[in-house]
């Protein structure tokens, strides 16, 4: 699979299809069993997560993406630790205004949607050229899903976004291109609008 310099790519499939494993492999958390990984034209198969992050990869995992006992402000400060000023944090707070009202609040007491926003915001503070998100709306109230979808759609016009997501409409809204996984394989792929209307899609997503 490949991702463009800007735009969204969705990875769809049933639970257990291999989606999270794929993201962890791309992030360097798991060793690739076969094949090669390239990032921005550079070989990345055998290098660690730190190298990938320094070269522009951002990753928001499905769980444990924030420091629960630290405040929202401290979580953002950690994300911006390599920055010379706080302009990046201000940009994140403009991107997710709800967070500006929670700066002194422990991250663990945020709502599910607010924690996801914080995790995404903190990842953005590393100035990634590619952002990978694993289930960014899991456990999120339906009223907040729309806000996250809107922000991710806007973000995909600036950088490359790879999203694993069970919320089909959100994934197709963010993505320009879709890969559907089944037991570690990719039996279906194509432009988002084409895949949306492909009768095979529901067959691969059905429980």
Image: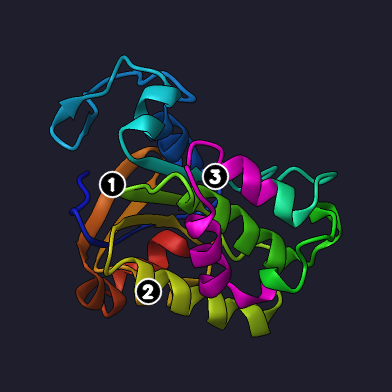
Quick one: 25 or 194, which is closer to the camera? 25
Residue at x 38%, y 37% (from the top left corner) = 184
Residue at the far top: name it: 46
Task: Give the label, 2 or 1, closer to the camera.
Answer: 2
Residue 75 visible, this orientation: yes
- Residue that badge 3 annotates: 80
What span is colored magenta in the figure?
A: 75-98
Residue 105 position, x and y percent, is: 84, 60
Q: Which mark is residue 186?
A: 1
Residue at x 32%, y 40% (from the top left corner) = 185
Crowd tier of the residue under label 3, counting other residues whose Cα lies within 10 Å: few below 14, some 14–19, many 20 or above: many
Residue 49 position, x and y percent, is: 44, 25
Disc nearer the start of the sequence (3/1)? 3
Q: Identify the image quadrant of residue 114.
A: bottom right
Is residue 140 inside the magenta stretch?
no
- Relative to residue 67, is residue 16 drawn left or right? left
Is residue 87 inside the magenta stretch?
yes
Secondary structure that dominates the magenta span: helix
Residue 26, relative to residue 143: is it above or below?
above
Q: Which mark is residue 153?
A: 2
- What quarter of the picture does the C terminus occupy? bottom right
Quick one: 90 or 33, which is closer to the camera? 90
């Amino acid at each position: 699979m490949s991702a463009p310099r800007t735009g969204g790519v969705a990875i769809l499939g049933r639970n257990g299809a291999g989606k999270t494993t794929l993201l962890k492999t791309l992030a360097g958390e798991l060793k690739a069993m076969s094949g090669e990984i390239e990032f921005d034209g550079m070989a990345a198969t055998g290098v660690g997560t730190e190298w990938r992050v320094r070269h522009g990869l951002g990753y928001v995992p499905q769980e444990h993406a924030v420091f629960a006992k630290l405040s929202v402000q401290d979580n953002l400060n950690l994300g911006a630790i390599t920055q010379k000023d706080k302009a990046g944090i201000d940009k994140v707070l403009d991107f997710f205004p709800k967070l500006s009202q929670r700066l002194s609040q422990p991250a663990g007491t945020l709502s599910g949607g607010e924690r996801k926003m914080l995790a995404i915001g903190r990842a953005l503070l590393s100035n990634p050229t590619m952002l990978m998100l694993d289930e960014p709306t899991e456990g999120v109230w339906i009223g907040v899903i729309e806000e996250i979808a809107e922000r991710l759609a806007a973000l995909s016009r600036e950088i490359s976004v790879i999203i694993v997501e069970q919320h089909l409409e959100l994934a197709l809204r963010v993505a320009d291109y879709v890969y559907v996984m089944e037991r570690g394989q990719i039996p279906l792929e194509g432009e988002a609008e084409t895949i949306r209307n492909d009768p095979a899609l529901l067959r691969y997503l059905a429980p």
